Image: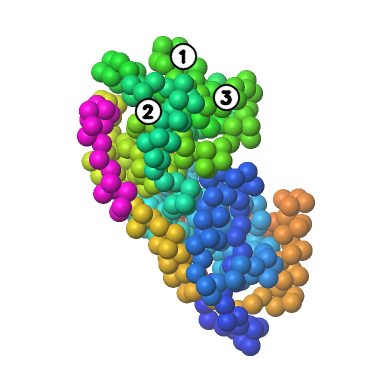
Amino acid sequence: MRGLSPNRSTIGREFVKPRVHFFGGQGIGWALDEDLAQARSALEPGIEVGTFAASSIVLSAWWPPLVRMGRRALGKKTILCFADNPPAFYLTVPGFDEAAARVDLWIARSEEALDQFRELGLPVALAPYTVDAKIFHPLTDGARNDVRAELGLAPEDFVVGNFHRDSLGSDLSLPKVQKGPDLFVDIVEQALERIPHLKVLLAGPRRHWLRRELAARGIPFVFRGEVVDGDDYRVNILDRRVLNRLYGALDAVVISSRWEGGPYSVLESIFAGRPVISTRVGTSGDLLGGWLFDFSSEAVKLLELIEAGGGHFDGIRDGAMRSHSASALGSALAAVIKSTPRQAPGFWEQGESFFWSVMSRAHPSFRGCLGLHKGVSDAMGLVRERKPDGRHVIAAAVSIAEAQR
């Protein structure tokens, strides 16, 4: 990492405590903001949170804001960056090779992402996702029945669903390929033939495509939200306590994503005490074991098993509450942060950082390129040309590129 050894300009200006600036949120209370909120809450004593200019360490929720900030504003700071998606997806996104040239340490959130960063030769550490166990917890039988009654669900209904965005923000008539709503609707259509009392529960913003597709196929569903023809992104974002109550109404959560950094929904489901099945993505692959599926027919069999009373997830929940607790996240972050430099930026460094951060927002010409990481640039070229080279990360990236196309 940059600046691990003190130089003449920093000797005598060491902080007793490392000072970190949390960066790159969206300000809407959704996944990236939750990443930063959970990280702040999990910080161990002895680590300070500071302003951008006065902090020697920047922890970003994702990499695009770092590229937009640029070389001049970032200066000599140590840059840590959460992986909000697996690196295979990043290889399909312009600018990743520039971010890779400047990020000092990537923070993977799953074993899948950890392995992919290593295949690319990028510095990486693992810090798990977590959710607030005071918010996401099992409901009592009475509370669960009350929620289902409020939603118009019958006691005999076998209710499946998820609370992902399934429609593209740029065109709400198209599915969000990452979340696999096409796979989800195939699963529930097949499952309905085996479980006639199946019903789908949807909630959250940008559920337009899936609502239309379920209606077109005659699959019964309930949407908990305000029906808006246009973008409902801010209208239908739900408070997490409301989300926990909605999880309580489900008999099974179905995660059909093609790639994920998390998703948070797997932890929210597990902490809420609900059965969950998932494709082999991100955190799901770390936690769910035999409840993972590759094909819709496998997912249907898992739903039949849950409907028959075989969905026992207590052991999975106990394990997740240990491995993905706030204390586990805090310990992982502390190990990373306390190994980075503790020198305070000097007066002139702070002034330059503040000035260039303002100017970079004013116009891109003030940013300064971060450079390019040759290894990552070469990998991105292989993905563009659809030329797998034996690395799993390249093969996964090619699959993602094909799915997006």
The magenta-colored residue range is: 303-319
Q: Which residue ends up furthest to the front in the rendered image? A: 142
Horizontal arrangement in the rendering, residue 252 relative to residue 385 (left or right) = left
Q: Earlier in the sequence, mark 3 or mark 1?
A: 3
Q: What residue type is disc 1 on?
A: Ala
The reply to whether residue 118 is visible in this rendering is yes
Type of secondary structure dominating the magenta stretch:
helix
Give whichever of 189, 143 is nearer the camera: 143
Q: Give neighbour class at mark 1: few <14, some 14-19, many 20+ (Cα, 10 Å).
A: few
**x then y, percent, for residue 11:** 62, 86
- Would you name the residue on which mark 2 appears? 160
Callout 2 secondary element: strand
Q: Which mark is residue 215?
A: 1
Q: What residue type is disc 3 on?
A: Leu
Q: Give neighbour class at mark 2: few <14, some 14-19, many 20+ (Cα, 10 Å).
A: many
- As measured in the structure, the alpha-carbon distance from the residue carrying label 1 to the one carrying label 2 is 16 Å
- Would you name the residue on which mark 3 appears? 172
Q: Residue at x 37, y 36 (%)?
A: 141
